[in-house]
Image (cartoon, helix red, strand yellow):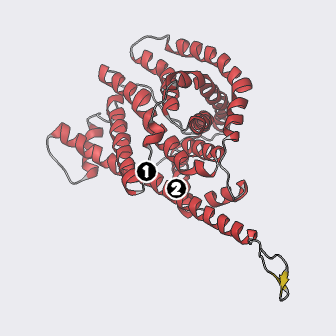
């Protein structure tokens, strides 16, 4: 091959690496933006399904108790409220179970065959799933508790300053065998499974090709915000961050489903025992949490650094810098619309708690 200049030019021209790099950057930016659009679209769709199914559930409940149908949603709600049917835990937990289960089914139906997003790979258990789930549980619970303490201090400060902070209430009202069973099924089994599928499986499946640590942070952020109140949002972000790191480490939500079930079961002990008339549930839960905290602190100081090192060594090679990928994610119009929808819920709940209405 002749490398000598010919007619004032070189006979061999090296590739234009700058041009190729720009093409690769543009291609990666488009691919990431596409995945963020799909993610935001699915999250919005999940919330739309939830909204619609609230109406469906109330209509079905009205038909169940009256044997007739009314086209007026207000009539259905008024009847159920006037007869005290909406106040019991059995009613609300059955509603939650119906709404999130059908919504998740609808979401998977759209994600897999239509958007070609295969979540089945992340659902597959592997040898050692149970052991890994139990092993990492103390770390997740400890993060949850520590950030929950910070959230509690913030909530207390706001309440002391005259600002009422909305919070969730999972105590069992009108206790019955059915109410207790349905709360256990929803809070300790179905809820964790669906939340892991949506907020770990879906988010990380779409974003992890562009950074595992970045996808873990986004998963925790979205998971925290979806809880709808400051106290739960902050603690859920802490625990959710550990869940997300475990998910990207093992490329599976199987261990985090186990972690989530154990966490919710421990947290539910006081409510369940109170409903059964056994007043020591709080003490039992506190004792378990203290024991778990010792293992959790070991996890923070020893296991967490190893976990982060393993994830970091397995990070995908991206053309875009981290800051550029963050900009792509947080300037995505559809994702911003999703965040606006979620934040609007926080604002509305604050207004209701402090002004009324």
Give the left or right position of residue 139, taking residue 167 as reference. right
**Which of the 4 quarters of the picture holds residue 105?**
top left
Q: Is residue 47 visible?
A: yes
Query: Who is closer to the viewer here, 163 or 4?
Result: 4
- Quadrant, the N terminus: bottom right
**What residue does disc 2 label?**
338
* Mark 2 vs mark 1, CA separation in Å: 9 Å
Q: Residue at x 47, y 11 (%)?
A: 279
**Classed neighbour count for the residue bearing mark 1: other residues with Cα under 10 Å, few (<14), some (14–19), many (≥20):** some
**Which of the 4 quarters of the picture holds residue 91?**
top left
**Residue 116 location in percent, x, y?**
42, 54
Query: Who is closer to the viewer here, 117 or 186?
Result: 117
**Residue 268 location in percent, x, y?**
47, 23
**What residue does disc 1 label?**
47
Q: Residue at x 54, y 49 (%)?
A: 351
Give the left or right position of residue 301, taking residue 115 as reference. right
**Residue 243 location in percent, x, y?**
57, 34
* First of labels 2, 1 by sequence position: 1
**Residue 192 location in percent, x, y?**
46, 33
Assign a secondary structure to mark 2. Answer: helix
**Classed neighbour count for the residue bearing mark 2: other residues with Cα under 10 Å, few (<14), some (14–19), many (≥20):** many
Q: Residue furthest left?
A: 67
- Residues at badges 2 and 1 in contact (C-beta under 8 Å)? yes
Query: Who is closer to the viewer here, 141 or 29?
Result: 29
**Which of the 4 quarters of the picture holds residue 291?**
top right
């Amino acid at each position: 091959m002749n490398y000598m200049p010919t007619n004032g030019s070189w006979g061999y021209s090296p590739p234009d690496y700058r041009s190729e790099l720009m093409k690769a950057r543009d291609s990666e930016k488009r691919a990431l933006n596409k995945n963020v659009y799909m993610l935001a679209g699915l999250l919005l769709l999940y919330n739309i399904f939830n909204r619609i199914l609230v109406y469906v559930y109330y209509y079905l409940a009205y038909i169940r108790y009256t044997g007739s149908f009314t086209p007026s949603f207000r009539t259905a709600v008024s009847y159920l409220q006037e007869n005290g049917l909406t106040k019991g835990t059995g009613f609300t937990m059955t509603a939650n179970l119906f709404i999130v289960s059908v919504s998740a089914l609808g979401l998977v139906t759209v994600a897999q065959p239509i958007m070609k997003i295969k979540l089945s790979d992340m659902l597959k258990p592997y040898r050692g799933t149970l052991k890994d789930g139990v092993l990492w549980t103390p770390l997740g619970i400890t993060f949850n508790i520590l950030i929950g303490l910070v959230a509690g201090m913030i909530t207390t400060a706001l309440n002391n300053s005259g600002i009422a902070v909305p919070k969730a209430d999972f105590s069992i009202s009108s206790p019955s065998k059915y109410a207790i069973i349905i709360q256990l099924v929803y809070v300790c089994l179905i809820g964790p499974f669906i939340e892991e599928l949506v907020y770990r499986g879906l988010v990380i499946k779409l974003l992890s090709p562009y950074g595992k640590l970045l996808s873990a942070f986004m998963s925790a952020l979205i998971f925290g915000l979806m809880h709808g109140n400051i106290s739960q949002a902050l603690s859920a972000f802490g625990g959710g961050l550990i869940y997300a790191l475990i998910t990207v480490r093992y490329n599976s939500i199987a261990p985090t489903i186990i972690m989530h079930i154990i966490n919710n079961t421990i947290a539910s002990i006081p409510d369940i025992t109170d409903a059964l008339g056994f007043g020591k549930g709080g003490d039992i839960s506190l004792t378990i949490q203290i024991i778990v905290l010792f293992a959790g602190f070991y996890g923070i100081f020893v296991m967490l650094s190893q976990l982060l090192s393993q994830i970091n060594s397995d990070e995908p090679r991206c053309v875009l810098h981290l800051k550029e990928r963050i900009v792509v994610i947080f300037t995505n119009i559809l994702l911003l619309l999703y965040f606006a929808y979620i934040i609007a819920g926080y604002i509305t709940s604050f207004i209701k708690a402090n002004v009324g209405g």
